[in-house]
Image (spheres, rainbow, N blue to C red):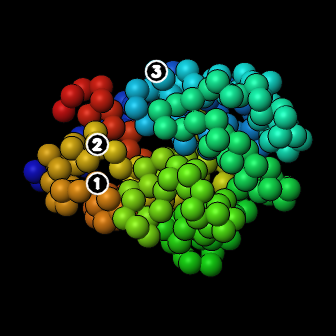
Amino acid sequence: MDKEVIKDLLDQKYHQFNAPEFIGTDPIQIPHMFSKKEDIEISGFIAATLAWGQRVSIIRNSKKIMEQMDFAPHDFIVNHQPKDLARLKDIKHRTFQFEDTQFFFKSLQAIYKDPNGMEKLFKEGFKDTGNIKGAITLFREAFLRGEQEHRSQKHIANPNKGSAAKRINMFLRWMVRKDNFGVDFGIWDIPTSALHIPLDVHVGNVSRKLELLSRKANDWKAVVELTDNLKKLDAEDPVKYDYALFGLGVFEKF
């Protein structure tokens, strides 16, 4: 397919799906429950972590966690004691169990002892390495704090081992992208041009049909290949086409 034809199609679908109506169908609705920066970050990170499987279940379980945090995620993370987590013991999502909740909340509490929280870790990681892969890797190391053998490490993607890191890339899109459509938040100071596509089955399948992706596996090499091709369509904001590719796959069965 001609490059200009592909760009016209994806631009059209980007504008179609990057709209307030999209929020109610997507886990991004969870951070949209909040206005405080830290609440947006923490609720978004939790929702993105749970973002595999049916979206109805992802949203339902994320809301349950917000409810048990009294809809004040930052305050809860910073001030909770281990005994306070008992109220979350019955909330599970696929392989994400109560033990993982305990570990995640403990790690987030340590991170938010610094008032700049997660943003600082990702920004410093990006500054030190010059790329998002490096930023994700250094964040992962800080989050796990040397406990690489803990069962919860499987819930934090490792692009150095080939993971597409779909959920973290999606979370970064939420936090970093800035536009006037009101879906992504744009509250972190990282270049939008540095973001990488959140690659899932739907995005991968549509991208291959459009000949934007030749690699068969949905891994980090595929993320890089697809992102590089999307940069040819928009060098400053390649991941805006996540809306188009995901929408074509999920909503239009392209």
**Disc 2 designates what residue?**
201
Label 1, label 2: how far apart the Cα atoms are: 7 Å
How far is the residue under mark 2 from the one under mark 3? 17 Å
Q: Quadrant of residue 135?
A: bottom right
Who is closer to the viewer here, 129 or 236? 129
Three-letter amino acid code of the residue under disc 1: Asn
Question: Mark 1 = which residue?
Answer: 218
Q: Position of residue 42 (x, y in %)?
A: 70, 42
Q: Amino acid at mark 2?
A: Val
Q: Quadrant of the C terminus?
A: top left
Q: Are marks 2 and 3 in contact (CB under 8 Å)?
A: no
**79 up-or-down from 17: above or below:** below
User: On screen, 71 above or below 161?
Assistant: above
**For the point 76% across and 25% down, which residue is it?**
87
Q: Which residue is mark 3?
A: 56
The location of residue 252, given as percent across then percent down, is 24, 26
Q: Is residue 253 visible?
A: yes
Tag 1: Cα neighbours inside 10 Å, few (<14), some, or many (≥20)? Answer: many
The mark that comes first in sequence, 3 or 1, is: 3
- Image position of 123 (left or right of 112): left
Instruction: Write the residue at 30% across / 25% down.
Output: 251
- Of pointers 2 and 3, the one earlier in the residue sequence: 3
